[in-house]
């Protein structure tokens, strides 16, 4: 989905490498949540 290796994903998830804007946008669409929620700027609303 993001076109990155498993080791790169691991480094991103552990905070060694930051996600870029395009990756955050793709993840938010794939997960169906606002990018602000992924970034911790707004709480994720549960229906």
Image (cartoon, rainbow, N blue to C red):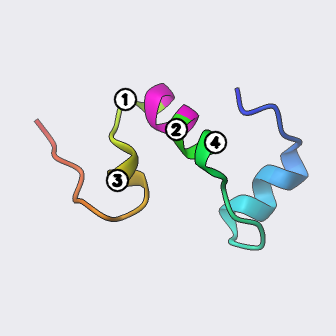
Element assignment for label 3: helix
Sooner in the amino-acid sequence: mark 1 or mark 4: 4
Tell which residue pokes out farthest to the front in this image.
21
Give the numbered dot on residue 23. Answer: 4
| Mark 3 → mark 2, Cα distance in angstroms | 10 Å
First along the sequence among labels 3 and 2: 2
Q: Quadrant of the N terminus?
A: top right
Query: Is label 1 or label 3 in front?
Result: 3
Using the image, determine if residue 45 lies above or below residue 16.
above
What secondary structure is found at the residue carrying circle 1? loop
Q: The magenta stretch spans which residues?
A: 26-30
Question: Is mark 4 in CB contact (under 8 Å) with mark 2?
Answer: yes
Residue sitting at 31 percent across and 64 percent down? 41
Mark 4 Cα shell of 10 Å, populated few (<14), some (14-19), many (≥20): some
- The residue that label 3 is drawn on is 36
- Residue 24 placed where, x, y %? 55, 45
Distance Cα–Cα, label 1 vs label 4 = 14 Å
Which residue is at 89% across, 53% downward? 7
Observer-side mark, 1 or 2, equals 2
Q: Mark 3 and 2 residues: CB-CB less than 8 Å, in contact?
A: no
Between marks 1 and 4 in the image, the one whose residue lies nearer the viewer: 4
Is residue 35 placed above or below 10 in the rendered structure? above
Is 1 above or below relative to 41?
above
From mark 3 to mark 4, how far is it between C-alphas?
A: 13 Å
N-term-proximal mark, 1 vs 2: 2
Query: Which mark, by number, is residue 32?
Result: 1
**Image quarter hosting the C terminus:** top left
Asked if marks 1 and 4 touch (Cβ < 8 Å), the reply is: no
Indicate the secondary structure of the residue bearing disc 4.
helix
Mainly helix, strand or loop, the magenta region?
A: helix
Residue 5, by quadrant, is top right
Give residue 15's position: percent from left, percent from top. Answer: 68, 72
């Amino acid at each position: 989905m993001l076109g990155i290796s498993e080791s790169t994903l691991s480094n991103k998830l552990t905070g060694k490498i930051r996600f870029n804007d395009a990756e955050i946008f793709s993840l938010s669409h794939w997960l169906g949540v606002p990018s602000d929620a992924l970034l911790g700027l707004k709480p994720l609303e549960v229906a």
